[in-house]
Amino acid sequence: MQRPAELGDRSLFPRLEADVYAAHAAISPPSSRVEQAVADFMREQAAKGAGAFMRWKEAREALRPRLGALIGAPGCDVAFTGNTTQGITAIAVCLPWRRGERVVLCRGEFPTNVTPWLQAARAHDLQPVWVDAPDPLRPVGDFLDRLEQALRGGARLVALSAVAFQTGMRLPLGELAALCHAHGAELFIDAIQAVGAVPIDVVADGVDYLAAGSHKWLMGLDGCGLLYVAPERAAALRPLMAGWLSHEAGGLDFLGRGAGHLRYDRPIRQRADLFESGMANAIGLIALGAAIEPLEALGTATIFGHVDRYNGALSEGLVARGFRTLRAASVGARAGILGVLPPGDVELIALHAALGRAGVVTSTPDGVLRFAPHWPNAHDEVPRVLDAVDAAVAELRAATSA
Ligand SMILES: Cc1ncc(COP(=O)(O)O)c(C=O)c1O
């Protein structure tokens, strides 16, 4: 009988070396349940080879509606992908673009949600339109106004992150989708910094497309992700990235039903999983299935509340030490990430390294010191983090004044 996951209890991560692991927005360490699930898969695969295929394929299919539930979508509208980028590229390649259409992009986005759109712009003669990043210290209405202004010129698609990777600012997906649709634009959401950390409901919010990877807040492994495509949007795609596993039922008959079934004219599925074009990342999906069990048991709303209290206490302590916090005032604009800027005389990269030596693992995207705790992080870590910050800052100041 497995012990249930509990907020603030790290016992499912016995190998974790850090005293405080607060880098879930970068890469999550796999739990012992994930290790066990992967080991079980490998053992059976090694013993049975092709004979194990159907059993694991069924396990994968059981994962699809579970991933859907984490984003408020039916499983049939969710595809497994290799990463966030693959999901974005799939749509950028397969949208039936018309020459000259405008694509709204955001300065400060992670490049994942920019490069594929710029490539599509080159290929189809589209016009990229840039808006400034949302400022976590300003009301979200400021950003929505800027976006509306860009949309007044017309747009085919708006590409945004649900949660900004540096500041942790969360955007209101329902309001974004309504705004985009009012102007005839579709909404693509990069949700890798949101799924698993905050509740998401793509159907209720009217999001058209959403992509994420599994190695951050979902706590799976690298090289595995998901793509949601609203059914009416999927129906309009040109399936340019279809492969041998993208055909409707019957596409596999040639492997097990004798001669006469090898055909190339079977229709392609016009839904998200058309992008599952060849063999899947079996290990990644096995790992993901085990990784999300605690998220399902605890619930993302509960996890967010836990992490938000942790970040609130940490932010307060850091501000008292001269740091600038990028934590949004409104709870709806916050997620799992706490971004802070060190005092002017403390160098960010050196501080990050000193914290790491003290057993506090953080990350430093785009000039920000990023804390990203998840459900296993206990609130009583916060005083230890602040002690480590005090020691690191004192060490760095002593080194520069010497
Ligand atoms: C906002 C955001 N999008 C995407 C990625 C990664 O994309 P992929 O899953 O394609 O590696 C990251 C971080 O690695 C990220 O922070």
Image (cartoon, helix red, strand yellow):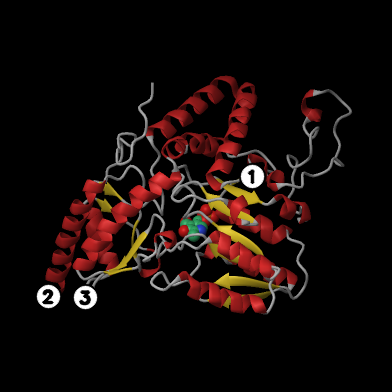
The residue tagged 3 is 345
Would the CB of label 2 be found within 8 Å of ligand 1? no
Residue 373 in sight in this render: no
Q: Quadrant of the N terminus?
A: top left
Give how far across and how far down residue 140 sits, in percent.
Answer: 47, 70
Q: Is residue 24 left or right of residue 18?
A: right
Give how far across and how far down residue 325 sits, in percent.
Answer: 31, 67
The residue tagged 2 is 401
The residue tagged 1 is 79
- Does dot 2 land on a helix, a strand or a loop? helix
Give how far across and how far down residue 121 sits, in percent.
Answer: 68, 71
Residue at mark 3 to residue at mark 1: CA–CA distance: 47 Å
Name the residue type under label 2. Answer: Ser
Q: Are marks 2 and 3 in contact (CB under 8 Å)?
A: no
Name the residue type under label 3. Answer: Asp
Residue 45, placed above or below residue 155 = above
Q: Nearer the viewer, mark 2 or mark 1?
A: 1
- Does dot 3 land on a helix, a strand or a loop? loop
